[in-house]
Amino acid sequence: MAEMELSPGILARGRWLPEQVEASWSEEPYEPPVAATREADEAIAQLARRGSPSHDGMSTRLAGLRVAQDELHLELQPIRWALRLTSDALGSLAAMCAVRSADGRWLAGHRAEWLASWPGRWALGAGGSVDPGEHPVQTLRRELAEEWSVTPASLSVEALVCSEQNVVLFLGLAWLAPGATVTPEDEHSDYAWWPPDPQSWPPEADGAVRTMGLLLAS
C-alpha cells in the first residue's frame, strides 16, 4: 500500500458529493512501533482508572490519498483504535460531521465528561472513528443517526485535516430539512444552536472549534 507523509494542516480541500468519494482497503492491519503500543496500553489503562469506557479494538488509518476536482480517493488500513490516544496517532482516521439547520445555524454539543476524547468540551455536530471496512461517508451518516437521531437532507465532504497529533479528520457538512429536530444521546450533556456566522459564536467555542467552523463556512 502507498504511504503518505503526514504534516499538520489541510490535506485536501473541496466539496465532494458522497458518490465522489472512493475508498480502498488493505487487508493487513498496521503494525505500530513497540513504543507506540506501550503508550496506547497506558492510555487505555488511564481511561479505565477515570471510569471511561475502554472500548479498544480496531479502527482505521489513512495510508494514501489521491485528490481531483471531481473525486477523492482514500487508501485505508486497519489500525488499533487506542493509538489515536497517543502522542503520534499515526494517521488514525476520525469522521466529523458539522450540522447546520435549514436557516444556517450550527449544531453544537457539550461532550460528556466520561468520553475518551474531548471530554467536557463543546464540539460541532457528530463524530467518531471509522470502523474497519466502513466507508467514511457511511461513518458520517451513522454518527449523525447515533448521536442526534437525524438523517441529513444533504451531505457533502469538505476536507481532510491532519492535527498536530497526526489524527486525520474526515470532515463532512450536513444540512437538515426545515423543521427537523435533533435528539441527543448520552454522549452529550447539553446542546445549542450557534449563529450562522462563526465569528458570532459564544465563548465556549474554543479556538479549534471556531477554526473548524470558519473552514467549513468558507
Image (cartoon, rainbow, N blue to C red):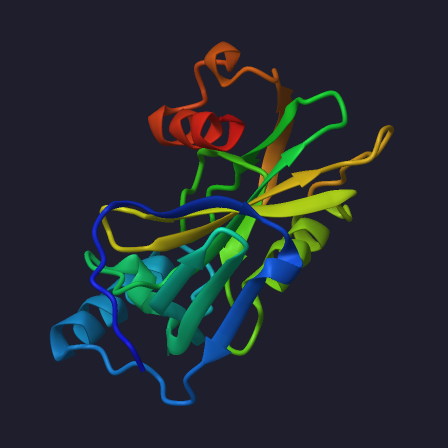
As displayed, is residue 31 above or below residue 213?
below
Q: Residue furthest left?
A: 35
Task: Tell me: 14 left or right of 135.
Answer: left
Quarter containing the N terminus: bottom left
In this rendering, the answer to whether 44 lies above or below 204 is below
Q: Is residue 125 visible?
A: yes
Q: Nearer the viewer, residue 185 or 153?
A: 153
The residue positioned 67% from the left and 55% from the top of the image is 141
Question: Residue 133 placed where, x, y %?
Answer: 54, 78
Q: Give 118 or 75, whichever is nearer the viewer.
A: 75
Q: Is residue 186 visible?
A: no
Q: Residue 90 is drawn in which quadrant?
A: bottom left
Q: Is residue 133 left or right of residue 166?
A: right
Horizontal and vertical percent position of residue 19: 65, 61
Looking at the picture, how far across and down is residue 68, in whole percent? 45, 56
The picture places residue 84, in percent across and down from the top left corner, at 32, 61
